[in-house]
Image (cartoon, grey):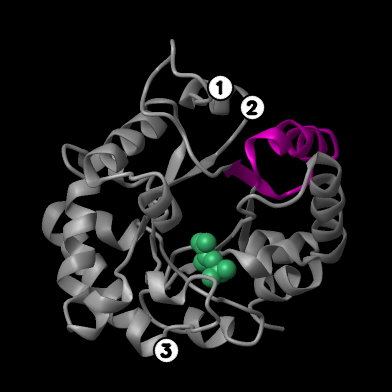
Amino acid sequence: ATGRRPLMAGNWKMNLNHLEAIALVQKLAFSLNEQQLTDVEVVVLPPFVDIRSVQTLTDGDKLLIGYGAQDVSQHKSGAYTGEISGAMLAKLGCQYVVVGHSERRQYHNEDDALVNAKVKAALANGIAPILCVGEGLAVREAGEHVGYTLAQLDAALEKIKTDEVEKIVVAYEPVWAIGTGKVATPQDAQEVIGAIRTRLAEKYTGGTADRIRILYGGSVKHDNVASIIEQPDIDGALVGGASIDAEGFVRICRLGK
Ligand code: PEP
């Protein structure tokens, strides 16, 4: 990860109410010192209803922990009951938003065109999308994981220009490794993430691809994070289950120590 600041992002999914959110962020802040939070960027991605509490805590106490949301509407505003706009997230100080997570693709029928629209909605509001891509088990077993993942990447980045793409974080999350305890080997993760960087270098000029952070996600824990982050193209992790356990996530943010 030469020259790129590692990023550890905790996707809480649909867990923790706003009081539990405050307790977890406080524990993280007390357990990680300033140097650790400078060396590694630590970000939490709580449910929408927790974001205001996390904002108050991080702003008020000047905690060096970033935060964002797990989804954003592709629409600007209007009659879209239940949706949350990029402008609303920006107003709450969100720096990041997850886009294209496999759970949203699977349970909410989000397709590549919608993912692309959400990437644009985030960028239009100054929020960095954490763009998730990755294949399911059948695709992996057919040996088509690289092509499949790059096609998702191409579709999500359609009409995104060089100056905008630098803000994006890509997360390679093989669906068969999410929440299953089946972590991809560091070599498997590097193979696809290396291919993602190569594709970005083909699409964007001026060394852009070397500045974009690419994370691995899928059953990352404190005892496997070190071997993953050692890989040359892997710049951090998107962590689900292990991110709502304060002690475990702190150890992940210390890169396994
Ligand atoms: C995720 O949901 O982004 C994820 C990687 O989940 P887990 O770490 O639980 O596999």
Instruction: Name the spot of residue 149 as percent of width and height, x first.
Output: 23, 65
Say which residue appears at 44% left-offset and 41% top-offset: 128
Instruction: Read off the residue under disc 3.
Output: 185
Quadrant (top left/top right/bottom left/bottom right) for the N terminus: bottom left
Q: What residue type is labelled 1?
A: Met
Horizontally, is 14 left or right of 79 in the view? right
Q: Does the magenta stretch include residue 62?
A: yes
Q: Which amino acid does label 2 sit on?
A: Leu
Which of the two discs, 2 and 3, labels the residue nearer the N terminus?
Answer: 2
Residue that lies at the very extreme toward the left in this rendered image = 202
The count of marks equals 3
Instruction: Read off the residue under disc 2.
Output: 92
Can the viewer see residue 205 in this picture? no
Distance CA(mark 2)–CA(mark 3): 37 Å
Can the viewer see residue 157 in this picture? yes
Quadrant (top left/top right/bottom left/bottom right) for the C terminus: bottom right
Instruction: Read off the residue under disc 1.
Output: 88
Label 1, secondary structure: give it. helix
Labels 2 and 1 touching (C-beta < 8 A): yes
For the record, the magenta segment spans 46-68
Say which residue appears at 79% left-offset and 64% top-offset: 32
Horizontally, is 16 left or right of 23 in the view? left
Q: How crowded is mark 3: few (under 14 residues within 10 Å), some or many (20 or more)?
A: few
Single out the mark in the foreground, 2 or 3.
3
Instruction: Name the spot of residue 215 as percent of width and height, x first.
Output: 44, 66
